[in-house]
């Protein structure tokens, strides 16, 4: 699974962003997978994770090293993690409110499993429209998020985004651009994750491999 046929690669980080956040990293992993319903073994795995994750774990979560690192970074970029929750804390709240992580589809289940097991958040784009390599940069004032035919969201100047060679495709730790997420027409996906200071590389790679393995059924 970790061979050259499925190897994460680093995305680029713009010089001005790297100067301000020197340990910010983007890792990308293309996967030949299409969206589908989760098989029974994935739904069972999600239920088992839910059963093991109780209120005490949720309360202690933010003090764990990886979740804490994302909380620190949120504050560095002007987000209050007690208002705009980090991905793992948002998943924990979802678990407590809904009584468990419910199976939605194979991709969402794979993203949730990888997040809960490692604390590292992942996102997925439809590989088809992606042009060039993905990276992190700041948006210019009024720049569109994505290339959808419908009126796109216009970004404020300085917003951190994940972009390809043409336009931003996702707000960092935020929404994907309309028309660029995985849908029923997707034939190939691009997984990406954002690592910050204090998050070991092994956790980041494990999150990507875990998600890919779930998607590919290996």
Image (cartoon, rainbow, N blue to C red):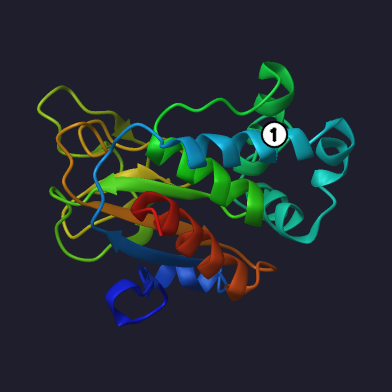
From the viewer's perspective, is residue 171 above or below residue 104?
A: below
Which is more toward the observer, 83 or 27? 27
Residue 203 in view, yes or no: yes
Side of 103 where 13 appears, left or right: left
Which residue sits at x=16%, y=46%?
187
Given the current orientation, which residue lies at the most extreme front position? 40
Which residue is at 42% across, 66% downward?
Answer: 27
- Provide residue 207's location: percent of width, then percent of height: 53, 60
Name the residue beneath numbered marker 1: 50
Placement of the N terminus among the 4 image quadrants:
bottom left
Where residue 52 appears, x then y in whole percent? Answer: 77, 40
Residue 29 is left or right of residue 112, and the answer is left
Q: Nearer the viewer, residue 177 or 78?
A: 177
Q: Indicate the secondary structure of the residue bearing disc 1.
A: helix
Q: Position of residue 189 (x, y in %)?
A: 26, 51
Q: Quadrant of the C terminus?
A: bottom left
Image quarter of residue 132: bottom left
Residues 6 and 119: in front is 6
Q: Residue extending furthest bottom?
A: 4
Depicted 201 relative to depicted 169: above or below: below
Instruction: Give the mark count.
Output: 1
Q: Residue at the location (38% across, 73% down)?
A: 10
Q: Is residue 135 left or right of residue 43?
A: left
Instruction: Specify few, some or many for label 1: CA neighbours under 10 Å numbering under 14, 14-19, or 20 or more.
Output: some
Quick check: can you spot residue 89?
no
Residue 153 place in picture, x, y as percent = 28, 28
Q: Residue furthest top?
A: 98
Rendered image quadrant of residue 39: top left
């Amino acid at each position: 699974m970790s061979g050259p046929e499925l190897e994460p690669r680093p995305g680029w980080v713009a010089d001005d962003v790297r100067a301000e956040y020197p340990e910010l990293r983007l890792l990308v992993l293309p996967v030949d997978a299409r969206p589908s319903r989760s098989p029974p073994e994935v739904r069972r795995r999600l239920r088992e994770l839910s059963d093991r994750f109780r209120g005490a774990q949720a309360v202690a979560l933010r003090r764990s090293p990886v979740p804490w690192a994302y909380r620190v970074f949120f504050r560095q970029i002007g987000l209050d993690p007690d208002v705009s929750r980090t991905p793992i804390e948002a998943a924990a709240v979802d678990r407590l409110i809904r009584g468990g992580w419910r199976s939605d589809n194979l991709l969402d289940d794979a993203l949730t499993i990888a997040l809960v097991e490692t604390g590292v958040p992942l996102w997925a784009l439809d590989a088809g429209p992606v042009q060039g390599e993905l990276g992190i940069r700041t948006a210019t004032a009024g720049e569109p998020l994505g290339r959808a035919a419908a009126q796109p969201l216009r970004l404020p100047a300085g917003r951190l985004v994940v972009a390809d060679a043409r336009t931003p495709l996702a707000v960092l730790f935020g929404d994907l651009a309309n028309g660029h997420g995985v849908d029923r027409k997707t034939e190939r996906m691009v997984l990406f994750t954002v690592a910050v200071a204090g998050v070991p590389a092994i956790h980041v790679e494990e999150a990507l491999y875990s998600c890919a393995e779930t998607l590919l059924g290996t």
